Image: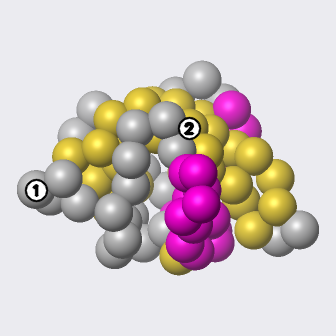
Amino acid sequence: MEKEIGKIVHWYDKIGVAVIKLSGKLSVGDRIKVKRHDSEFEETVSSMQLDHENISSGKKGQEVAVKLSNEGHDNAMVFKVE
């Protein structure tokens, strides 16, 4: 089961980091799916930052930075995989 928890508002290609505007809670260790058009991939959140500080979870309304192993894109939707 998937639950939408945010959208990528900026993708930093050189460092492989997505800034995600959260519409729900996201924690380190959560499994996420990133979808954009016909492409999608899943991975586990290994680290998260807010204002350049490591955090263990983010909540609705925050913009958090998450390192991704695959390429993210602006406006890609992010889902939590239950």
Q: Amino acid at mark 1?
A: Lys
Q: Can you tell which quarter of the image residue 9 is in?
A: top left
- Say whether residue 14 is left or right of residue 2: left
Q: Position of residue 24 (x, y in %)?
A: 72, 39
Residue that protrudes farthest toward the left in the picture: 14
Please give the name of the residue rendered at 81% of the width and 53% of the height, measured from the top-left corner.
3
Q: Position of residue 10 (x, y in %)?
A: 33, 35
| Residue 65 visible within the image | no
Per the rendering, the mark at residue 56 is none
- Say whether residue 78 is left or right of residue 62: right
Q: Secondary structure at mark 2?
A: strand
Per the rendering, the mark at residue 7 is 2
Q: Position of residue 35 (x, y in %)?
A: 60, 56
Is tag 1's residue or tag 2's residue first in the polypeptide sequence?
2
**Magenta-drawn segment:** 23-42
Q: Nearer the viewer, residue 7 or 26?
A: 7
Q: Amino acid at mark 2?
A: Lys
Q: Are marks 1 and 2 in contact (CB under 8 Å)?
A: no
Q: Main secondary structure of the magenta part?
A: strand
Task: Say how many tags the image has.
Answer: 2
Is residue 81 on the magenta stretch?
Answer: no
Q: Tag 1: Cα neighbours inside 10 Å, few (<14), some, or many (≥20)? A: few
Residue that protrudes farthest toward the front in the picture: 38
Is residue 35 on the magenta stretch?
Answer: yes
Residue that protrudes farthest toward the top in the picture: 61
Q: Tag 2: Cα neighbours inside 10 Å, few (<14), some, or many (≥20)? A: many
- Say whether residue 82 is left or right of residue 44: right
Q: CA distance from mark 1 to mark 2?
A: 20 Å
| Residue 14 visible within the image | yes
Q: Can you tell which quarter of the image residue 31 is in?
A: bottom right
Q: Secondary structure at mark 1?
A: loop
Residue bearing mark 1: 14
